[in-house]
Image (cartoon, rainbow, N blue to C red):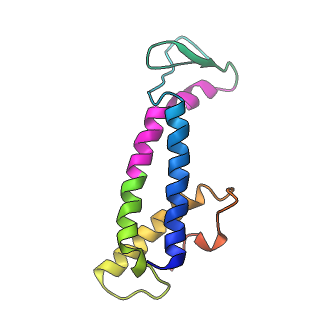
Amino acid sequence: MTEHNADLVAFVRARLDDEERLAEAAGGAGWHHPPGTPGEVHDSLGAIAFSVRTRGFDEHIARQDPARTLRRIGSNRVLLDQYAALAGLDVDSPASDYASGRAVGLGFAVRQLAAEHADHPDYRASWLPRFT
């Protein structure tokens, strides 16, 4: 794996770890927005986790519950692990074989994951997805 790609993998792993800590600190369980209770978001035990009575935040917040976040993190880690195994083949002028093509495709996806955190001080503009 090139140092550049290793740094990209480490950056994305660290952001996933950060998100996982936050989701677990929020209880790690599912939230929901019960019908007939505008502005309320309830935890998995039915207690009101919080109340936001403006602008329809309740449904959005309930959708971004800790359990869903943890499932997304798990899926992203699978993708990241697949890329890490081939990252050395993800170069500007890849070979014309299956493994190299797979590495470039997975690299594009991992760069998209990294771009979600472009506001992080450790993010590098050189990680922007490459278009060929």
Count of numbered marks:
0
Would residue 26 be visible to someone looking at this image?
Answer: yes
The magenta-colored residue range is 55-75
Frontmost residue, 44 versus 25: 25
Is residue 82 one of those drawn in magenta? no
Q: Is residue 36 above or below residue 52?
A: above
Quarter location, residue 125: bottom right
Q: Which residue lies most toward the left here? A: 98
Q: What residue do we see at 51% from left, 63% from top?
A: 10
- On the rendered structure, is 89 left or right of 98? right
Task: State the residue at coordinates (36%, 56%).
Answer: 78
- Residue at left 41%, top 71%? 105
Q: Main secondary structure of the magenta part?
A: helix
Q: Position of residue 67 (x, y in %)?
A: 43, 33
Q: Is residue 131 visible?
A: no
Q: Is residue 17 left or right of residue 89?
A: right
Quadrant holding the N terminus: bottom left
Residue 52 falls in which quadrant of the image? Answer: top right
Image coordinates for residue 27, horizontal then vertical, percent: 49, 27
> Residue 120: x, y in percent?
67, 56
Compared to residue 4, the image places residue 32 above or below, namely above
Q: Is residue 121 left or right of residue 44?
A: right
Residue at 37 percent of width and 62 percent of height: 81
Give percent across and percent down for residue 76. Answer: 42, 53
